[in-house]
Image (cartoon, coloured by chain):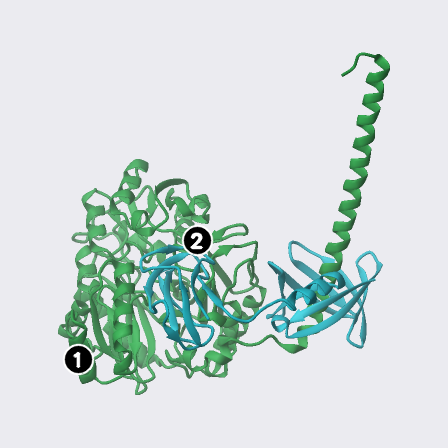
Chain colours: A green, B cyan
Amino acid sequence: METALAPVPEAMPKPIRKVLVANRGEIAVRVIRTCREMGLPAVAIYSDADRGALHVRQADEAVHVGPAPARDSYLSIDRVLDAAKKTGADAIHPGYGFLSEKAEFARAVERAGITFIGPRPESMEAMGVKTTARANMAAAGVPTVPGSPAPIAAEAEARAFAARLGWPVMIKAAAGGGGKGMKRCDRAEDFSALWQSARREAGGAFGDDRLYLEKFLERPRHVEIQVFCDEQGNAIHLGERECSVQRRQQKVIEESPSCILDEDLRRAMGEVAVKAARAVGYRGAGTVELLVDAGRRFYFLEMNTRLQVEHPVTEMLTGLDLVRMQLEVARGEPILRQEEVQRRGHAIEARVYAEDPARGFMPSPGKITYLRVPGGPGVRDDSGVYTGWTVPSFYDPMISKLVAWAPTRPQAIARLLRALGEYTVHGITTNVPFLAAALDHPAFRSGDYDTGFCAAYAKELVRPPDPRYEQVALIAAAISAFKKDHDEAEAYAARAGMAAAARSAWARLGRARALRGGGR
Amino acid sequence: MSTYVALLDGGAREQAIQVTRQGPGIYEVRIGDQVHLVDAFQHDYGTLSLIVDTQSTTAMLDQRGARVHVRVRGSVFPVEILDERRLRMRRAATRFTVRGKQTVTSPMPGRVAKVLVRLGDQVKEGQGLVVVEAMKMENEMRSPRDGKVVELHVQEGQAVEGNAKLCAIE
């Protein structure tokens, strides 16, 4: 408080008057909500597939940026910048995915005299190529997972390196993130197919198909630390998020606190995360991802130089609004002090995907014919969809994030299960029953789970329906069919009656004309 | 009174249900050897509130083509409901179905990332045939049976619609 008015070097106040959100779906809606609370007009961008999207409706202004494929719209730096210039937006929030971790974009934004709500391009570059990031971290004294020091071009060379590292290995995209272009390989025989598949996925998702290898740790847990830095050189952490429930290398359920962290480990990991952020001159919100092995040793995995999908977990736990903090840092304001951060209770997030867990998590795009979302105490639904919206097949299949907060972990699990029970999506298949089965699983309840959770219990997580409810379900279906048949019969009778009346009216008219004479 | 037959587990099981209307929203339902008095109240789209004897239950009905997905307390029952006439037609139709060629289709719009087989290849059940990329993820379409690739409709890089034929196995 006493230093609030003291002049600080290089902290220039940069007023923000209008924010363009260079994203779509739930995260665009999320950012627009905070803009509204702060009294800032928000500009949405949209592709041909997204004219009807929720974020377009919620924004104050909206600009069309191109056809449905992301590379021609949401990934087009020129078009996004044109939209900002056209609407006079003086700041751009990139959300996550798309252009959020492209240093080239951040640079272009600042060159145009617009504030980029995110880190400096140099920090993004230092962390963006995963192999460079690993080298930087090792130099800063942060422990890293054993692996190839640089991307490997030739498959044969990669296979030989993998054999030296020892199976299983992780094949990863150097430009990676979000599980795209990431494959676990258990044996030499599978290496070729997985390597090529990872290469194609990486090329498609990031426009950069360079791959590298890391040793796969035994029973690893994926724990990440939320960090925040300001222009004044302050750096804090907001504690961890445990993200070990993953399918296809993508997170499904995240929680905080993590069951394997105690105060000492939390402090140690927090300090390492802050050190990692400082090492690259970080600014704004970032996440340092770490792997914790069975012996509770932890290793730097990567730093995500953006807001994470699962940031609401930290928001529920700390009571802070991370998007507001990002905007404040972008305006040149200082962040709160480490000792001001208070974590209370337990928060769990479940990602609702348009996908079918019974068919290998196959995406299930299509029209949402009906949507009803949960409410009640301690529940937050960050959604990007509505009844009548068609989930396009061009983008990520996540439609919402459901978060529950409660004083204790068992209560938070019970609350999230209760809320998932209220979540109703018709027309498309979602993973809601899968999420409930995962939360309800003894291994999750006990807190003793790792990144192999979904694969290890795959069969138990796609549960058959409970036979106790079969009879009442059939009664409902039969009564519904009965109602429909009878309503249709009544409607038909009503139409038939009207037709008869219409016929007699024409007959009456004909007779009247005949009586007048000369009628045609 | 109307009699319906519910097909469960993709038609593997059947259950007859008789519904008789007793008054506005009140039905007598005979299912198996049990008779229930059911008070049914239709809420918004697809939501049916049932009081069966005294048990209060919400059923969410999601119409998916010929089937309806009935969700009760987190359990989803995919059911097909047929009246007597439709059941007779169905039984007549199944006599003419033949076993044989299985066509593999794309479950959603996307792009063919990789074709793993050639026309005439012998394949095993579960073997990968075509990799379709959609929503930025690769999805491997696998063979539904042992057999030979007798049709191949796509090539790598090609865009495909949902339900587009990819190949056929015989």
Report crowding for label 1: few under 14, some 14 to 19, many 20 or more residues within 10 A (C-alpha): some
Image vertical order of residue A45 relative to residue A415, above or below:
above
Q: Residue furthest left?
A: A139
Viewer-proximal residue among A80 and A415: A80
- Residue A481, x across and y down, in percent: 72, 59
Q: Is residue A517 visible?
A: yes
Which numbered circle lies on residue A358?
none
Instruction: Identify the amino acid type marked 1.
Output: Phe
Residue at which label 1 appears = A161
> In the rendered structure, are the residues bearing label 1 and label 2 in contact, judged by CB atoms less than 8 Å apart?
no
Instruction: Identify the amino acid type marked 2.
Output: Pro
Q: Secondary structure at mark 1?
A: helix
Report crowding for label 2: few under 14, some 14 to 19, many 20 or more residues within 10 A (C-alpha): some
- Residue A281, x across and y down, in percent: 18, 61
Give the residue at x 45% y 45%.
A58
**Screen quadrant of the N terminus of chain A:** bottom left
**Screen quadrant of the C terminus of chain A:** top right
Image vertical order of residue A142 relative to residue A432, above or below:
below
Give the residue at x 39% y 48%.
A35
Viewer-proximal residue among A256 and A166: A166
Task: Tell me the quarter of the picture where residue A252 sits.
Answer: bottom left
Q: Secondary structure at mark 2?
A: loop
- Residue A47, x across and y down, in percent: 37, 46
Which numbered circle lies on residue A392?
2
Give the residue at x 72% y 55%.
A484
Viewer-proximal residue among A178 and A319: A178
Q: Which is nearer the N-term, disc 1 or disc 2?
A: 1
Viewer-proximal residue among A446 and A257: A446
Image vertical order of residue A504 relative to residue B58, above or below:
above
Q: Is residue A141 visible?
A: no
Task: Tell me the quarter of the picture where residue B16 sits.
Answer: bottom right
